[in-house]
Image (cartoon, rainbow, N blue to C red):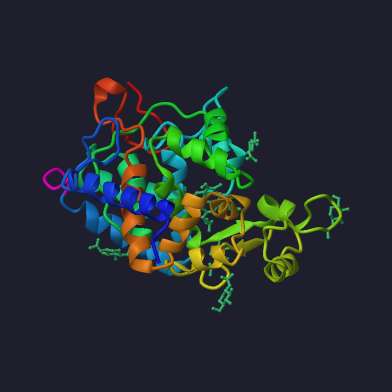
Amino acid sequence: MKPSINAVLVSLLLLIDVVSVCHGGGGGRGGGLSPVFYDKSCPQIDRIVRNITWSKVAENSTMAPKLLRMHYHDCFVRGCDASLLLDSTSGNPAEKEAIQNSNIRGYEVIDEIKTRLEEECPGIVSCADIVALVARDAVSYQVLTGRKDGKVSLSSEASINLPSAGANFTTLYQQFIGLGLNIIDLVALSGAHTIGVAHCAVFQRRLNVTGKGDIDPTLDPEYAEFVRTQCINPAVAVALDANSSASFDSHYFAGLRQNKGLLRSDAALLTDRRSAHIVRRFEKFPVFMTYFGNSMKKMGSIGLITREEDGGEIRKNCRVVNAN
Ligand code: HEM
Ligand SMILES: *[C@@H]1O[C@H](CO)[C@@H](O)[C@H](O)[C@H]1NC(C)=O
Ligand SMILES: *[C@@H]1O[C@H](CO)[C@@H](O)[C@H](O)[C@H]1NC(C)=O
Ligand SMILES: *[C@@H]1O[C@H](CO)[C@@H](O)[C@H](O)[C@H]1NC(C)=O
Ligand SMILES: *[C@@H]1O[C@H](CO)[C@@H](O)[C@H](O)[C@H]1NC(C)=O
Ligand SMILES: *[C@@H]1O[C@H](CO)[C@@H](O)[C@H](O)[C@H]1NC(C)=O
């Protein structure tokens, strides 16, 4: 059988992506991230971050998805500059306060790592890099470092820039393109939903579309019934990947193809022929993992600040801008 034009096109796109990574193009506007950034200035960094992250995840495995999601929510708003970690100041509700960030957890893990790193190598490691490294250790892929921390955090920006669970393909695509990401990144990064949970409040519309108890026709009816039995109230959290929400695998894509993607934004990936094709490719775990690592690298260099002249700093406390 001859491959369809679309299949060829997507394969080509996939190939181009791999090549650009080989040439060190991280997709970041400023470039400047490095795999060895702290090798001389803080050689213990990887050991410290991994040790604390793994011990937190070992204590409670629900931390892993939360820490991965934190990096995403930081990067999509003002770039990966730890603006998500800043506490609100008087008259300025910070990103944390945005409804999209209400279920972000793990700030105290970052604080603990920051405190350890300030003892070990004071003033060296940015909070933005800590967030990126923690996400890596929660899941395992390669990460580059060298980010500076930003000084601004606005709840209103988080509301605009973070895609909503009800978004359709067009909206998701535009939001990703707007940040320099492409359709492969959209599908690969959505694969993060192979771990963790979503609260019934964010998807319950799909179980009652018109208010007559009717389910979203794009949702598998049996799966919808199963989810409905779990959603006895909006605060209940349901696995995003019903079969294996604790393991980072490619079941998310297999479930998605059977119309068992929990969020509308997940199901939306099937409504575009190109992204639907990528979903099929990513059912193979090694393929997914390769692209996921690459897309995380691109996401991790959104809106980079690598120089103080550009408004970056190394925060002393991840929750507040340095005084000076
Ligand atoms: C494509 C657009 C995306 C949308 C609309 C979206 C939306 C959501 C929503 C609504 C939840 C449930 C939150 C809750 O109820 O507590 C969630 C959970 C999650 N998201 Fe996404 N997300 C998107 C992309 C991503 C990306 C790019 C990543 C990371 C690379 C990610 C990682 C996660 C993880 C790990 C969870 C589980 C969190 C937990 O267990 O507490 N998501 N997402
Ligand atoms: C790792 O963490 C544990 C407990 O938090 C601590 O006892 C141990 O000394 C740490 N090891 C390293 C190498 O930092
Ligand atoms: C793990 O953390 C979750 C919140 O993320 C909490 O609901 C749960 O009770 C914790 N489990 C344990 C065993 O501490
Ligand atoms: C997608 O959602 C946007 C925003 O809600 C809406 O304006 C647009 O018409 C929708 N597109 C499609 C194809 O449904
Ligand atoms: C659906 O929504 C309507 C209106 O909000 C509500 O009265 C009804 O109980 C809901 N049905 C189910 C099955 O959730
Ligand atoms: C879980 O696995 C079973 C057996 O492979 C499959 O039939 C089912 O569709 C899966 N469910 C989800 C939500 O992925």
Between 321 and 232, which is closer to the camera in this rendering?
232
| Left or right of 260, for residue 56 | left
Q: Where does the image place residue 198, in percent across and percent down from the top left?
A: 60, 57
Q: Which quadrant is the C terminus positioned in?
A: top left
- Secondary structure mainly formed by the magenta segment: loop
Q: Check residue 39 for magenta coloring.
A: yes
The structure residue drawn at horizontal position 11% and vertical position 45%, both measured from the top left corner, is 40
| Left or right of 123, for residue 91 | right
| Left or right of 175, for residue 202 | right
Q: Vertical placement of 11 versus 160: above or below?
A: below
The structure residue drawn at horizontal position 59% and vertical position 67%, both measured from the top left corner, is 258
Residue 73 shows up from this direction: yes
Q: Vertical placement of 160 versus 119: above or below?
A: above
How many marks can you see? 0
Q: Which residue is the extreme one toward the front?
A: 1
Q: Where does the image place residue 132, in percent across and percent down from the top left?
A: 34, 47
Q: Which residue is the extreme one toward the left?
A: 40
The structure residue drawn at horizontal position 58% and vertical position 36%, both measured from the top left corner, is 97
Where are the magenta residues, as a range? 38-42
Q: Where does the image place residue 256, in percent across and percent down from the top left?
A: 55, 62
Residue 53 shows up from this direction: no
Q: Which quadrant is the N terminus positioned in?
A: bottom left
Q: Vertical placement of 191 versus 178: above or below?
A: below
